[in-house]
Amino acid sequence: MRTLFLADAHLKQPSDLNYRALLEFLDKQLGRVDTLVLLGDIFEFWVGYQHTVFAAYVPILEMLGRYREAGTQIIIVEGNHDFHLGPYFHDRLGALVLPDGGGVELDGQKVFLAHGDLANPEDRGYRILRSVLRSWPLRLLIRISPPDLAWGIAAKASRQSRRRRNKKSQQVPAREILQNYARAIQSRGYQTIVTGHFHQPFHETTEGYELVALGDWIDQFSYAVCENGLFELKTYDPVSDLGS
């Protein structure tokens, strides 16, 4: 069994390097993957319109549709930039949607999948913001707003979020946070924890668990593969593969 893990692509426009690289990469993997796991923030902005998708996301959605047709199971964990995914990913792609992460079994192992935005219990401000963004009143407000308006607001919010993330990445000890988080998850019987969000790739095995932090598909183009129960963190080279 071969499972592919990706997180934090923050896709915006099909002309962007990371978007083109992801389509190229997924095209090469098509037919070779039993399960495709997307661990949040694949999209720069997705709020779950019931009958509308942003035009910029049509190419990646068509690619995911090809994966479904090829018999690949799709699992997606909601991130802090993309949530309320059920109306499209469950209803149209038959994907397993995990709003807050959750456990699955892969090759006989209990694996916990998380975006990672809930890994830091001290980040109370974000947890409050997260609950507001995912609340039904705000969801209804977004759904009655014109998509172009929502896209414009999201683009501005994303720029501010990126500045905060760059500043926070210099202050937050991501490895320590994820190690503490993984230990807590492992105590519930999980052997492997796979997460994103912090944009810092690393893979470590301790006596009690295996932790895979995916990094991102923006600058690092990092991803993970589990084959026959063995996890490996890898990097894709978009320059050589796209010739640009």
Image: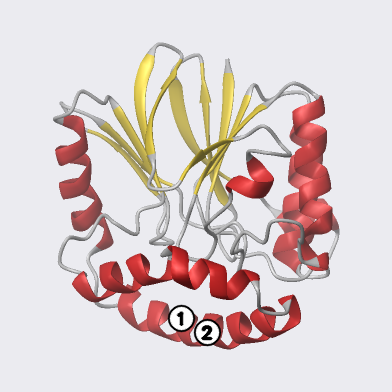
The x and y percentages for residue 198 are 38, 61
Marker disc for residue 157: 2
The x and y percentages for residue 112 are 35, 33
Residues at badges 2 and 1 in contact (C-beta under 8 Å)? yes
State which mark lies toward you, 2 or 1. 2
Report the side of 15 relative to 221 (left or right).
right
Question: Are there few (<14), some (14-19), or many (20+) residues within 10 Å of tag 2?
Answer: few
Q: Is residue 183 visible?
A: yes
Farthest-out residue, top: 108
Quarter assignment of residue 82:
bottom right
Quarter assignment of residue 210:
top left
Q: Is residue 239 visible?
A: no
Indicate the secondary structure of the residue bearing disc 2.
helix
Q: In the picture, which quadrant includes the N terminus?
A: top right
Check disc 1 and give the amino acid type: Ser
Report the side of 178 relative to 102 (left or right).
left
Indicate the secondary structure of the residue bearing disc 1.
helix
* Residue at the spot of label 1: 161
Measure the alpha-carbon separation of dots 2 and 1: 6 Å
